[in-house]
Image (tube, helix red, strand yellow):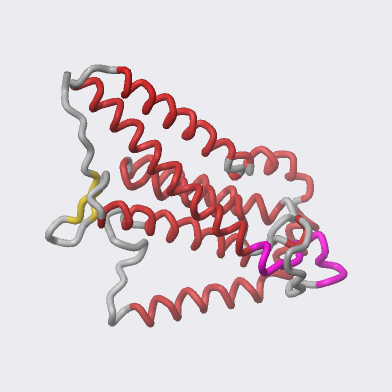
Amino acid sequence: MLNAQNKWPLAFSRVALPVYLAALVAIFLVLLALDAPVTIWAHENLIGWRPIFEIVTIPGNSKWTLVPLLVLMILAFGVSRLLPEGVRRVQMTTIASVSTFLFAGVALPGIISNFIKRILGRARPVHFDELGIAHFRPFSDWSYQSFPSGDTTTVFATAAVVMFFWPKWGRLLLIGAALVGFARIVLGVHFPTDVYGGLLLGTFGAYAVRNFCAERGWLFIQTEDGRFVPALKWPRA
């Protein structure tokens, strides 16, 4: 299970880093070998479940996360400017700051995901029968934007940024994120390696945004023992 107070999702060290990287690559290679058989299995055995997984995958659409956060951010900043100096203004400013961080922590990995998938141009499973799992057509249409999974990137980034403030809720969202990733495979829009790429990008991207903020003392601080913890201003009325 991820530790929200570590600098990175895994407890990297100079000694362990090569081992972790080798493990991540090994997992990718295993999933790559499973791309074809899993795609065939899902198509042959789970096609009747697709209506359910269409619902499961809804949270993967970034608009359901980013639009509410953007609205909350704008409203909170606006209200904070209207309030007089005092406890309520500080609280509202904190809400605005947290919503801004959540927005950035989800949006930035998503932007990177969209950039990568357009450059690589990996064919989606809809082309599997004719092109297989390793056909690339950069800067092409939607059907050639398979790696990484943008929906998976979004849900894992969302789970991570929530976990930084509310660990229990974040871990529950991780379970939901895994279900969304599986749904993308069942629906035939991604291979397992696409989902794995989205998992890594969303999670590491969210940690990178948190670390950037902590280095500047904004919303997070790094303790003497190396933990990254929230540092919110929330005075009592």
Classify the position of the C terminus by image quarter. top left
Asked if the magenta segment contains residue 120, the reply would be yes
Residue 7 in the image: above or below residue 218: below
Q: Residue at x 73, y 64 (%)?
A: 139
Q: Which residue does the image show at 15% across and 56% down from the upper left?
A: 223
Residue 180 lies in the magenta stretch: no
Query: From the viewer's perspective, is 149 left or right of 77?
Result: right
Q: Main secondary structure of the magenta part?
A: helix
**In the image, farthest residue toward the left:** 224
Residue situated in front as seen by the camera: 92 or 195: 92
Residue 86 image-quadrant placement: top left
Q: What segment is highlighted magenta in the picture?
A: 117-131
Number of numbered discs present?
0
Left or right, 76 with reference to 36:
left
Q: Residue at x 54, y 49 (%)?
A: 154
Q: State the residue in front, 25 or 221.
A: 221
Q: Is residue 140 above or below residue 206?
A: below
Return the x and y of residue 53 as percentages of the image width and height: 68, 43
Q: Reply above or below: 65 against 71.
A: below
Looking at the image, residue 35 sits to the left or right of residue 162; the answer is right
**Residue shown at the point (52%, 78%) measured from the top left:** 26
> In this view, which residue lies farthest toward the right?
130
Q: Quadrant of the N terminus?
A: bottom left
Rendered location of residue 182, percent (x, y): 62, 53
Relative vertical location of residue 215 with respect to residue 75 in this rendering, above or below: below
> Position of 84 compared to 78: left or right?
left
- Residue 8, percent across and down? 34, 63
Place of residue 121 in the rendered image (x, y in percent of width and height, measured from the top left):
72, 67
Which of the 4 image quarters holds residue 85? Answer: top left
Toward the viewer: 103 or 184?
103
